[in-house]
Image (cartoon, grey):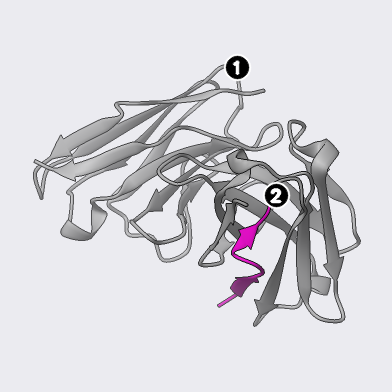
Amino acid sequence: EMVMTQSPATLSVSPGERATLSCRASQSVTTNLAWYQQKPGQAPRLLIYGASTRATGIPARFSGSGSGTEFTLTISSLQSEDFAVYFCQQYNNWPTFGQGTKVEIK
Amino acid sequence: QVQLQESGPGLVKPSETLSLNCAVSDYSISRGYYWGWIRQPPGKGLEWIGSIFHSGSTYYNPSLKSRITISVDTSKNQFSLKLSSVTAADTAVYYCARGYSYLDYWGQGSLVTVSS
């Protein structure tokens, strides 16, 4: 099983600041990596696929980078609606998710 | 905008079979794409269960494969999940979604509790 490890578990950020979330794969997934945002009581929302391609309707402040085993999701200037849990997911093999990073208000 | 809606019992007894349907709107399953199931135990992370193509080809999570059946009914534009021999560990919100690789449209989720 491909294990996805996200860090940190919780990230405290002030509105307007930059947030950087990390995701590491136990072996290479090339660029077969997606990021999702989940708010309480809601389904996950696709943000990024192919490691760096924004999904339809996703604001430009969200960006993804990386390949192989190391990936980053950057939110350039946090808005109030961005405080949520973020999951990475690989699909190089059968899909597996990271355990999530909670972005909370500092 | 593709819409998905899960339906099924919210309570299942241990050792019985969990059954859920996912109705798809504003997109014909027959046009293509994989269609999948994902679950999330309360307060925990996401687990992919399996996906099905409109032709009926399936991919299952190896850890659940012996208990899963996913089927598709293109005439009703819906697909279904059956998970047998459930235990309390199968208590979760079950989501249906479009995709096998990344998942771009999701249902709102259906909480299924396994309890006697």
Query: The residue under label 1 is which amino acid type?
Result: Gln
The residue pinned by badge 1 equals A27
Residue that label 2 marks: B100
Q: Residue at x 44, y 40 (%)?
A: B44
Query: Which residue is at 76% across, 58% downward?
Result: B81
Q: In which quarter of the view is residue B62 placed?
A: top right
Question: CA gap, disc 1 to disc 2?
Answer: 20 Å
State which quadrant residue A79 falls in. Answer: bottom left
Q: Is residue B46 above or below residue B5?
A: above
Q: Quadrant of the N terminus of chain B?
A: bottom right
Q: Is residue B72 left or right of residue A33?
A: right
Tell which subunit mark 1 falls on: A
- The amino acid type found where label 2 is placed reads Tyr
- Whether A35 is drawn above or below A43: the answer is above
SS for callout 2: loop
List the single residue furthest toward the top: A27
For the record, the magenta segment spans B1-13
The answer to whether marks 1 and 2 mark residues whose Cβ atoms lie closer than 8 Å is no
